[in-house]
Amino acid sequence: MARPIVPPPGYVLAGLAIQRLLARHPKAGIRRKAAAGVIVAGALGLFVTVALSFWRNGTTIEPRRPEEASRLVTDGLNALSRNPIYVGMAATLVAHALFLGSWRALLPVAGFVLVMDRTQIAAEEAALAELFGADYAEYRARVPRWVGPRPGGTPAPA
């Protein structure tokens, strides 16, 4: 599988710009600003937490070179989602749409998720499957790609 060329933050920046164009007359009240701020703070927390976890485990966070991963990180936030950083990026776009007060501004969120899911994540999963084999297959069966129910509807361990 070909390596993605555009780094994921590039898609986020494009999404933010498109959202701005889609929101004709953005007006954020104090409640929307506060809610958007909480969501962005959570998204930044996701990024920092996962980045530190990858650093502590001595593996790469570079999304364009997943074949350079030296260790499969399956604990912490990666035990809840196989892609917590991308969840945070999508949340940032949701926060911006909320801040702008535009339902149309949610369209780039769907576009971001679709592009990440079909290109970036697909390439990363292929590389991780090749690198980590059965360990990655077990992780993939246990943890959802984004968020939500566990694959196969299996209940969480007690």
Image (spheres, rainbow, N blue to C red):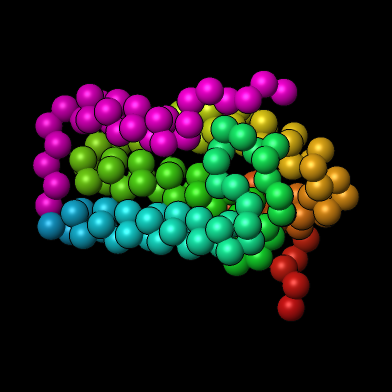
Quadrant in the picture for the C terminus: bottom right
Question: Could you tell me which residue is drawn at 50 percent across and 56 percent down?
Answer: 51
Depth check, front residue: 58 or 27: 58
Query: In the rendered view, does 108 fall on the left or right side of 86?
Result: left
Image vertical order of residue 142 relative to residue 92, above or below: below
Whether residue 69 appears in this view of the structure is yes
Question: Could you tell me which residue is drawn at 30 percent across and 33 percent down?
Answer: 16
Looking at the rendering, which quadrant does residue 18 occupy?
Answer: top left
Quadrant in the picture for the N terminus: top right
Image vertical order of residue 67 relative to residue 151, above or below: above
Question: Could you tell me which residue is drawn at 44 percent across and 50 percent down?
Answer: 88
* Image spot of residue 23 (x, y percent): 21, 30
Whether residue 148 appears in this view of the structure is no
Question: Could you tell me which residue is drawn at 83 percent across and 54 percent down?
Answer: 135
* Image spot of residue 67 (x, y percent): 70, 37
Depth check, front residue: 70 or 4: 70
* Image spot of residue 56 (x, y percent): 58, 64
Give the magenta part as a residue range. Answer: 1-29
* Image spot of residue 70 (x, y percent): 71, 50
Asked whether 6 falls inside the magenta stretch, the response is yes
Q: Residue furthest front?
A: 58
Image vertical order of residue 72 relative to residue 123, above or below: below
Query: In the rendered view, does 90 fall on the left or right side of 83?
Result: left
